[in-house]
Image: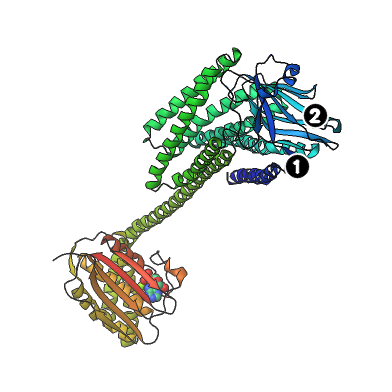
């Protein structure tokens, strides 16, 4: 999926770059040069039946002079036909041509002198035409007549009239629309890839994916069918392009609301849903009306324009305000996706407003083009949001599988301890009794033996005692429930232990320092708590290097009793820290590797916690905490 979205990015990037590369060139060619532009033309409102001869001989008062770039003539209400004339320069070099970028008309006849050189007619309601005609040297100083006819609102030339080398004009003519075509094709291409890609998606994701590809598809169609290029070059399909534009716009608008809903809806935006449903219904009706209008030879054009342009315009404004309002609301709640979406949507809104302002301030002589960049920005943000969703989903999945692994591990661990527990319990019981009996007899024999044998007996008894301690450890492990729990006075217990363990420390050439204040109480079984303390302190003593010291301190903090046992012994390797408490983990020659396992078990039963902090050769500190008991 990642690679797929990367490809998408690349396509969008290439499209944007190539079009922004083309745009300045296309516009650079529009800069009027004094020599090469015709600065005025004359206009004669007339009826469609008026012929060229009668126009040529019409009295000069009937002609109105229009200065190009200053003002553009408004078409009188009832008029549907107009004649326009302008004079060619007196010296026209070879291979020259005339280029008029923006002529608003459905039918056009172009005459140079008396000769008809071009005739186009759009039998569909579309009036943006361009004119590019070659002129020869013989036509120097001739008058050019254009007869324009339209049933639509505008009827005139709305741009400069350029005269230049035909090849240069040709380039302008083509480049003008190339941007639209490239952008449009890029969007169509992306939509296609997305639709194909959606086959691989799960049900939960597919809807927003398909919706966004529909947005892309409709934007692509709008870009292409908005450009006059396709009408000029594929006039036969003009009706189809018009229909495609209307259908695409009517698909785009609800799809946009729907995408918004898909991305942000969590059941809250009831009336966004209602509005979207209304939009869908309106679009369906409009498209139906469009076909009816067309089948009736555009008889209902006025009514259709009212619902498809005027009313739809207001609906679009409402839609934009609604979405922007909701975006602000979401942003206030800290929704990151709303921020991203607003950037795209805001760009579209601002660009469209700029377009509209330009449109009204330049007296309707304006080609909308800024909104396209807004459309691209919006589309990119939609994709960003989608990809972010995918990334988040992936992260969720990874976290989930990590958790699963962790619990599995825990389960295995507890299973293992369970097995050891039951084994230990049965074996230990069976072994302890014969051990006790053997010890008794050994003692008996020992008392009757000679000195030398007595010594051996003593060693045997000590070894038996060691075995007995191991068995006690085992039994504690298998039965950690604290048989009889009381409130333990920590200070008192530590004092007792100090007495027992001090000789061992002295024997190892070290000392024990205790700092435990009175009146610290925890809940537990006294002998098991003692076992914990002895296990830990013994470990510290066994870790002694020269001049060893064990510090024991206790204190109360946040309703807990903390107990620290700190030594300056050999410390523990980082890798071994994780192994502490695992059965049979020991680094000692005569060690059992059971002491800490038992200790952990008891502390767990006392609802306490234990942490080891240690570095190799830098001593070890054991930190325990237990719930405090009030006395
Ligand atoms: P044993 O003492 O029989 O080896 P334990 O479960 O008590 O078993 O301890 C396991 C291991 O943890 C020890 O072998 C030792 O390597 C390490 N260890 C525990 N406490 C300390 C300590 N205070 N200093 C250094 N190593 C320690
Ligand atoms: Mg030990």
> Can residue 288 be seen by looking at this rendering?
no
* Viewport quadrant of the C terminus: bottom left
Image location (x, y in percent) of residue 265: 41, 37
| Picture residue at 35% right of the left edge, 77% below the top | 540
Q: Say which label, 2 or 1, has the lower sequence index.
A: 1
User: Taking the image as four quarters, which one is ligand 1 found in?
Assistant: bottom left
Is 225 in front, or is 627?
Answer: 225
Q: Which residue is labeled 1 in the image?
A: 35
Can you give x and y, in whole percent of width and height, for residue 418 in the image? 36, 55
Is residue 156 placed above or below 507 in the rendered structure? above
Neighbours of disc 1 within 10 Å: few (<14), some (14-19), many (20+):
few
Q: State yes or no: Cβ of the residue under disc 2 lies below 8 Å from any atom of ligand 1.
A: no
Q: Are marks 2 and 1 in contact (CB under 8 Å)?
A: no
Quadrant in the picture for residue 154:
top right
With 268 as the anchor, is 162 left or right in this view?
Answer: right
Q: Nearer the viewer, residue 468 or 316?
A: 316
Q: Which quadrant of the view contains residue 584?
A: bottom left
**Mark 2 and mark 1: Cα distance apart in space:** 17 Å
Question: How many labels, in total?
Answer: 2
Q: Which residue is mark 2?
A: 142
Image: 513 above or below 96: below
Residue 323 in percent (x, y) is at 43, 37
Decide which of 366, 375 is in the foreground and name it: 366
């Amino acid at each position: 999926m990642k690679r797929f979205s990367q490809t998408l990015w690349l396509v969008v990037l290439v499209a944007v770059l190539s079009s922004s590369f083309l745009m300045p060139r296309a516009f650079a060619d529009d800069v009027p040069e004094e020599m090469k532009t015709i600065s005025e033309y004359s206009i004669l409102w007339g009826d469609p039946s008026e012929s060229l001869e009668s126009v040529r001989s019409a009295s000069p008062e009937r002609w109105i002079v229009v200065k190009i770039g200053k003002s553009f003539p408004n078409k009188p209400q009832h008029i549907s036909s107009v004649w326009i004339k302008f004079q060619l320069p007196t010296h026209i070099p070879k291979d020259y041509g005339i280029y008029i970028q923006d002529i608003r008309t459905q039918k056009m006849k172009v005459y140079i002198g008396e000769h008809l050189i071009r005739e186009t007619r759009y039998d569909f309601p579309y009036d943006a035409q361009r004119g590019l005609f070659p002129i020869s040297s013989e036509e120097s100083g001739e008058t050019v007549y254009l007869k324009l006819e339209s049933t639509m609102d505008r009827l005139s030339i709305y741009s400069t009239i350029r005269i230049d080398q035909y090849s240069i004009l040709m380039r302008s003519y083509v480049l003008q629309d190339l941007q639209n075509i490239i952008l449009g094709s890029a969007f169509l291409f992306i939509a296609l890839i997305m639709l194909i890609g959606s086959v691989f998606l799960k049900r939960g994701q597919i809807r927003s994916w398909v919706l966004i590809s529909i947005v892309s598809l409709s934007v692509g169609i709008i870009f292409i069918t908005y450009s006059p290029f396709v009408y000029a070059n594929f006039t036969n399909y003009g009706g189809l392009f018009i229909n495609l534009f209307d259908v695409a716009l009517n698909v785009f608008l609800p799809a946009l609301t729907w995408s918004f809903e898909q991305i942000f809806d969590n059941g809250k935006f009831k009336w966004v849903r209602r509005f979207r449903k209304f939009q869908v219904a309106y679009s369906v009706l409009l498209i139906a009306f469009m076909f009816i209008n067309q089948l009736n030879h555009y008889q209902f054009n006025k009514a259709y324009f009212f619902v498809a342009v005027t009313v739809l315009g207001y609906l679009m404004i409402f839609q934009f305000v609604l979405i922007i309002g909701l975006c602000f609301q979401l942003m206030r709640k800290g929704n990151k996706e709303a921020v991203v979406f607003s950037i795209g949507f805001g760009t579209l809104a601002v660009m469209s407003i700029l377009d509209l302002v330009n449109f009204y301030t330049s007296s309707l002589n304006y080609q909308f083009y800024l909104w396209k960049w807004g459309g691209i920005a919006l589309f990119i943000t939609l994709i960003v949001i989608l990809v972010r969703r995918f990334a988040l989903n992936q992260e969720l999945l990874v976290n989930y599988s990590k958790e699963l692994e962790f619990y599995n591990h825990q389960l295995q661990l507890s299973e293992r301890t369970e097995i050891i527990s039951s084994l230990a319990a049965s074996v230990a019981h069976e072994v302890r009794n014969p051990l006790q009996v053997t010890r008794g007899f050994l003692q008996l024999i020992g008392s009757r033996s000679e000195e030398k044998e007595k010594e051996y007996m003593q060693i045997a008894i000590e070894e038996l005692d060691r075995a007995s301690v191991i068995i006690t450890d085992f039994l504690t492990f298998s039965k950690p429930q604290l048989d009889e729990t009381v409130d333990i006075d920590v200070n008192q217990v530590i004092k007792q232990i100090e007495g027992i363990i001090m000789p061992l420390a002295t024997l190892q050439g070290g000392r024990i320092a205790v700092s435990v204040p009175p009146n610290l109480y925890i809940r537990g079984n006294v002998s098991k708590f003692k076992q914990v303390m002895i296990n830990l302190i013994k470990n510290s003593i066994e870790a002694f290097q020269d001049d060893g010291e064990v510090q024991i301190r206790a204190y109360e903090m946040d309703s807990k009793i903390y107990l620290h046992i700190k030594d300056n012994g050999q410390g523990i390797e980082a890798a071994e820290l994780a192994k502490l408490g695992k059965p049979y983990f020991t680094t000692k020659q005569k060690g059992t590797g059971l002491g800490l396992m038992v200790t952990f078990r008891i502390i767990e039963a006392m609802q306490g916690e234990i942490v080891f902090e240690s570095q190799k050769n830098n001593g070890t500190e054991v930190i325990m905490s237990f719930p405090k008991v009030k006395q």
